[in-house]
């Protein structure tokens, strides 16, 4: 299981890290909306490696058999490893290279509120929420938690679906024959 988890988790994590490095520094140029679309598309595509990892485990390690619990274990470990790569990449990018990212994003949110014709009270509320978010986001533990929560639900969902779809008893056990 270890080799499968490491292989698929690191490939998934590498995809996330490379795409983040390639796109996030230019988010203000390509637009935060487009950046989010690119980001979540990348997250969804990298999560497909969870399915392939669980299937690989079933076929190459488990002899064609897989319980839901074992499939879930393999999938969630791949998810966690991939997420660690994602979070580590973000922490380095954010704190070392892009400490002004939240300021730019908050300015974008306020401009978007103004452009939508929001009331001055709504704009002020958006500005206050942005300020509070920045204060919290500067704390590394909270930053890590938020970053982890960006990706984890997608990986968890793919893990659950993969474990359910790929579970398989051996032919002898399915027919009631024991060896």
Image (cartoon, helix red, strand yellow):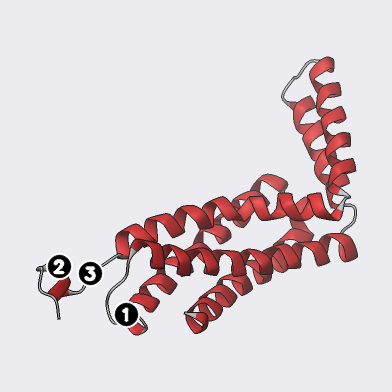
Among the two numbered marks 3 and 2 on one chain, the one whose residue lies closer to the N terminus? 3
At mark 1, the secondary structure is: helix
In the picture, measured across the screen, residue 41 lies left or right of residue 124, that is: left
Q: Mark 3 points at which residue?
A: 169
User: Which class describes the residues within 10 Å of circle 3: few (<14), some (14-19), or many (20+)?
Assistant: few
Callout 3 touching callout 2 (CB < 8 Å): yes
Q: How many angstroms separate mark 1 from mark 3 (CA)?
A: 12 Å
Nearer the observer, disc 1 or disc 3?
A: 3
Q: Nearer the viewer, residue 107 or 161?
A: 161
Residue 24 occupies quadrant: bottom right
Q: Mark 2 points at which residue?
A: 174
Q: How many angstroms separate mark 2 from mark 1 (CA)?
A: 17 Å
Residue 178 occupies quadrant: bottom left
In the picture, measured across the screen, residue 136 lies left or right of residue 173, that is: right
Q: Is residue 12 above or below residue 112?
A: below
Nearer the observer, disc 2 or disc 1?
A: 2
User: Which class describes the residues within 10 Å of circle 1: few (<14), some (14-19), or many (20+)?
Assistant: few
Q: Mark 1 points at which residue?
A: 59
Residue at point 38% right, 78% down? 56
User: Which class describes the residues within 10 Å of circle 2: few (<14), some (14-19), or many (20+)?
Assistant: few
In the picture, measured across the screen, residue 162 lies left or right of residue 13, that is: left
Q: Residue 167, percent across and down? A: 30, 65
Q: Residue 174, percent across and down? A: 15, 67
Residue at point 46% right, 70% down? 74
Q: How many angstroms separate mark 3 from mark 2 (CA)?
A: 6 Å
Among the two numbered marks 1 and 3 on one chain, the one whose residue lies closer to the N terminus? 1
Residue at point 32% right, 80% down? 59
Q: Residue 58, percent across and down? A: 34, 76
């Amino acid at each position: 299981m270890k080799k499968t988890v490491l292989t698929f988790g690191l490939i998934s994590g590498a995809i996330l890290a490379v795409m983040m490095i390639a796109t996030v520094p230019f988010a203000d140029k390509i637009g935060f909306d487009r950046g989010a679309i690119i980001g979540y598309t990348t997250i969804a595509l990298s999560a497909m490696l969870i399915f392939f990892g669980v299937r690989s485990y079933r076929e190459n390690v488990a002899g064609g058999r897989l319980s839901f619990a074992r499939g879930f274990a393999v999938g969630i470990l791949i998810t966690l490893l991939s997420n660690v790569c994602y979070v580590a990449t973000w922490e380095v990018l954010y704190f070392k290279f892009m400490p002004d990212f939240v300021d730019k994003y908050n300015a974008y949110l306020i401009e978007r509120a103004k452009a939508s014709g929001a009331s001055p009270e709504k704009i002020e509320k958006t500005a206050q929420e942005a300020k509070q978010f920045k204060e919290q986001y500067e704390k590394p533990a909270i930053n890590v938690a938020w970053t982890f929560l960006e990706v984890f639900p997608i990986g968890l969902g793919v893990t659950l679906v993969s474990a359910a779809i790929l579970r398989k008893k051996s032919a002898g056990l399915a027919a009631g024959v024991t060896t």
